[in-house]
Amino acid sequence: MSQPAARVLSSGMRLPPLPTIRELVKLYKLQAMKQLSQNFLMDERLTDKIVKSAGRIDSNDIVLEVGPGPGGITRSILRRQPQRLMLVEKDQRFGETLQLLRECAAPLNIQLDIYHEDILRFNIEQHVPDTTQRLHLIGNLPFAISTRLLINWYADLAARRGAFRRNDTCMTLTFQKEVAERICAPLASEQRCRLSVMSQIWTQPVLKFIIPGKAFVPKPQVDVGVVKLIPLKQPKTQLPFSLVERVVRHIFSMRQKYCRRGYSNLLPPEEREEHTHLLFERADVKDTLRPFELSVEECLRLATVYAEHVAAYPEVAKYDYRAPK
Ligand code: SAM
């Protein structure tokens, strides 16, 4: 094993000497598990760059890292010295390597809490009961759950709950490059999809940089994009999240067709044609645009008129065009 190097912190303090991540993975035989989408980042310059993308981290802030694995990004976060670092890692095998980092954090007065839990079930409010401290969400996300996690977080953001009780909780996360590009895709771009609109209703997403697949161990099939998602101070809608999600999902369910096609499936067949036409008129949206040509505002106007329609005809809310006849 090579001689561990002490790392200088921004404040001039040092992280105690530690074996490299590569050495720890070898030492503890931490082979990556495909079913947990494990791809490790060993390059400290890249982990530092991810954490730098999160912006300023103050000594009073809390950082929650999703899936720290052997702890590469965790080390970069520790070097920024938040008040508290919460690690949510499903795989118990990383217990010892994370424990090692907890020992390094203690003399720096950083509270490091390790939770061996599933981030999709993790109750942030229970572990951070008050909102006096700013929270940063950071993670090299497991590909298998990244979109689901993001949609869950948008639901929390819309309801101002969980990690989003304050309006300044930013997310700095990795995605497969194509997904990262879709999240940020502007109006009329080829990549624009449901995830672009959902992301841009509640946040301002910024594609920070691309990490080539070869930087990970094992190397994934794809490159990876680092995205910072900044919650909008003024949300673009007050409509319930589930209603907006339903409308946007239907609009984009037929990407290549006119947007009225997917939208019309929100309505039962007997009223479909007549009411689709009326709702587009009321929303002042051209029904022959393709879904990717619709602005966030147009999607939200379509959601608003649908909400009004459902208020007038409550049984329509239960209609599911995919349900068995
Ligand atoms: N942060 C490490 C790095 O950059 O080298 C590991 C990143 S790896 C892509 C994803 C990590 O998320 C793994 O450590 C995996 O065990 C963990 N993970 C997978 N599913 C999870 C879940 N549902 N909740 C919490 N952690 C999860």
Image (spheres, rainbow, N blue to C red):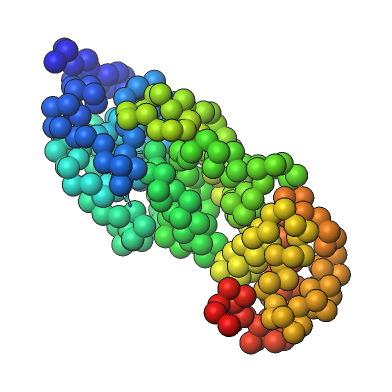
Asked if residue 243 shows in the view, the reply is yes
- Asked where in the image residue 230 lies, by quadrant, the reply is top right
Residue closer to the observer: 292 or 306? 292
- Asked where in the image residue 179 lies, by quadrant, the reply is top right
Question: Which quarter of the rendered picture does the N terminus lie within?
Answer: top left
Residue at figure coordinates x 81%, y 55% from the top left: 289
Where residue 234 sits in the image (x, y, percent)?
Answer: 64, 55
Would you say 229 lies left or right of 37 here? Answer: right
Residue at figure coordinates x 55%, y 62% from the top left: 158
Residue at figure coordinates x 58%, y 82% from the top left: 325
In this rendering, the answer to whether 240 lies above or below 47 is: below
Where residue 29 sits in the image (x, y, percent)?
Answer: 15, 32
Where residue 287 sits in the image (x, y, percent)?
Answer: 82, 62
Asked if residue 61 shows in the view, the reply is no
In this rendering, the answer to whether 283 lies above or below 3 is: below
Residue closer to the observer: 263 or 198? 263
The quarter of the rendering in which ligand 1 is drawn is top left
In this rendering, the answer to whether 195 lies above or below 300 is: above
- Asked where in the image residue 33 lies, by quadrant, the reply is top left
Residue lying at the far front of the rendered structure: 325
Residue at figure coordinates x 54%, y 79% from the top left: 324
Residue closer to the observer: 130 or 245? 245
